[in-house]
Amino acid sequence: MNPTAPNHSASGQVTFLGAGPGDPGLLTLRAVEALASADVLIADPQVLDVVRVHARAQVDTPLQASADEASIPAGVPALRDTGNLVMAAARAGKRVVRAVSGDPGLDGYVAEEMLACAAEGIVFEVVPGIAAAVGVPAYAGVPLRDAQGTDVRFVDARTADARCWSEVGASDATAVVSTSLDSVAAAAGELVSAGRKPDTPLTVTVAGTTTRQRTWTATLGSVAQVLKAAKVLPSPDGGQPVIAVVGERSAAAQRDRLSWFESKPLFGWRVLVPRTKEQAASLSDQLVSYGAVSHEVPTIAVEPPRTPQQMERAVKGLVTGRYEWIAFTSVNAVKAVREKFEEYGLDARAFAGIKVAAVGEQTAKALVAFGVKPDLVPSGEQSAAGLLEDWPPYDPVFDPIDRVFLPRADIATETLVAGLIELGWEVDDVTAYRTVRASPPPAETREAIKGGGFDAVLFTSSSTVRNLVGIAGKPHNVTVIACIGPATAKTAEEHGLRVDVMSPEPSVHKLAEALADFGAARRDAALEAGDPVTRPSERRPGSRRRARS
């Protein structure tokens, strides 16, 4: 054995990981894998919230400051002893992930930490990330090259010297300048002094790749006036980092066609989703795809029935052949029956010989996940009335059993029960779960609801209207109110709310689509009128139209 070779057995390993410019979706698959196996996570405060969700619950995070809590200039380590923390954890045999904003190869401090690992023989790897200088222009709709293959120069205004400015200013290359909001004009002045024409197009993007992103189009000579006219400067947030793209070929003039991210129909909207957390997940994902920031506030808590005996008898009746049909009207009903099956050691095979009906796409998906394919899903309206339209009447010749098992909530309406009886069926209407009002949300959320901090609220049932108003207060009148159907809209109006959006059918996904259509129409109207595109919450008294870091 070579006595000078490093001994890896007693040391851990370090993954230097690029977390990208801000959008959590830009993390690479390899980055997610590394985070999942980390013992210690040492992250820049700007990206801590992005990477922490992929780490194990037991992961040690010596640096706890989040991006909102940190007032640290970009490019400066969260703590001066970051490298010491990395080395100490690695020496202790830990698997360390060192996460940085952008790409680790462009971070000089990380290079020093890599050299320190190499000097001690600590095994390390590098997981590249999307650099802000590349990712932010892409999200701003500003391609860096055209068909003629123009040269691209990257400049860090904080470290650029006179020679750098002179070289970039004397060329016709597209310049991608990393700087701060209050230093953009100074950087533009450097380029003009070095030879660039004052009318050279320029874009400035703040909070790039996040739903707080804002981009301004100007020229080198007019950028100071443009930012002042937009009331962006002067501002206490002037020190936040920005990416400026300079050049005749940088497609700044084509942003009206290429700005795919900021032109999403609900871009930057804060949308309140008052549902149970399990129900809100898929809806929130859809809202995010429209550019919104989804905020989930449970208004309903689901609890077992007070007396479980009725549910127990019904489940046993499924096994003994008591029922011809079982009808599920919600995901919670599926969950309640599944939990009772698991309690008795049963699985989907217990449904053999029983016809299964389901109301709604999500309910059907929950059944399929359980291993049960529904025999009947309404062909039209996804509701109890829609199910009754397709439900066959009882026929003693073809139906050996005349009984239906209906597991549902304690507050469900009698529409389905009455309709099935009218069709000749006997119904065991069983309380499978209870819905109770959830606890009030945090004070900050309550203030945002009442003060107009949310741009829209999606109401998916009458109970969500009553419960949200009960636990948090009535949404502000600038907030867009979207309801899943006429009954929910009526309840909202009874509580003094103006209903702006109605889903064309009782589906949460159609409701989200309807809100997106509303947002798109609102955006188009503003552009056609020559007005700035604003969010509904920006209309509230005292609101400030400025970018936030």
Image (spheres, rainbow, N blue to C red):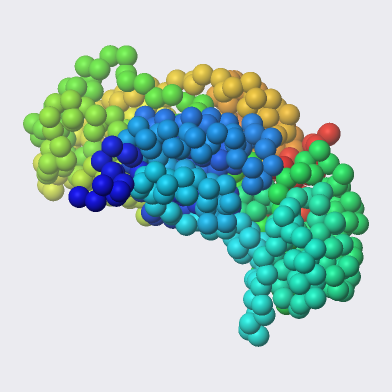
Name the image quarter holding residue 69.
top right
What residue is shown at x 72% (from left), y 55% (from top)?
159
- List x then y, in percent, for residue 243: 70, 57
- List x then y, in percent, for residue 106: 57, 56
Mark count: 0
Residue 362 is left or right of residue 194, and the answer is left
Classify 360 as above or below 415: below
Camera-nearest residue between 512 and 37: 37
Camera-nearest residue between 4 and 155: 4
Classify 115 as above or below 337: below
Name the image quarter holding residue 301.
top left
Q: Is residue 450 visible?
A: yes
Camera-nearest residue between 28 and 503: 28
Classify 444 as above or below 239: above
What residue is shown at x 58% (from left), y 51% (from top)?
108
What residue is shown at x 37% (from left), y 45% (from top)?
122
Tell which residue pokes out farthest to the bottom in this image: 148
Tell which residue pokes out farthest to the top in this image: 307
Q: Looking at the rendering, in which quadrant would you find the C terminus?
A: top right
- List x then y, in percent, for residue 58: 37, 29
- List x then y, in percent, for residue 333: 32, 33
Residue 423 is left or right of residue 477, and the answer is left
Name the image quarter holding residue 539.
top right
Tell which residue pokes out farthest to the front in this image: 3
Residue 57 is left or right of residue 189, and the answer is left
What residue is shown at x 73% (from left), y 53% (from top)?
158
Q: Is residue 289 visible?
A: no
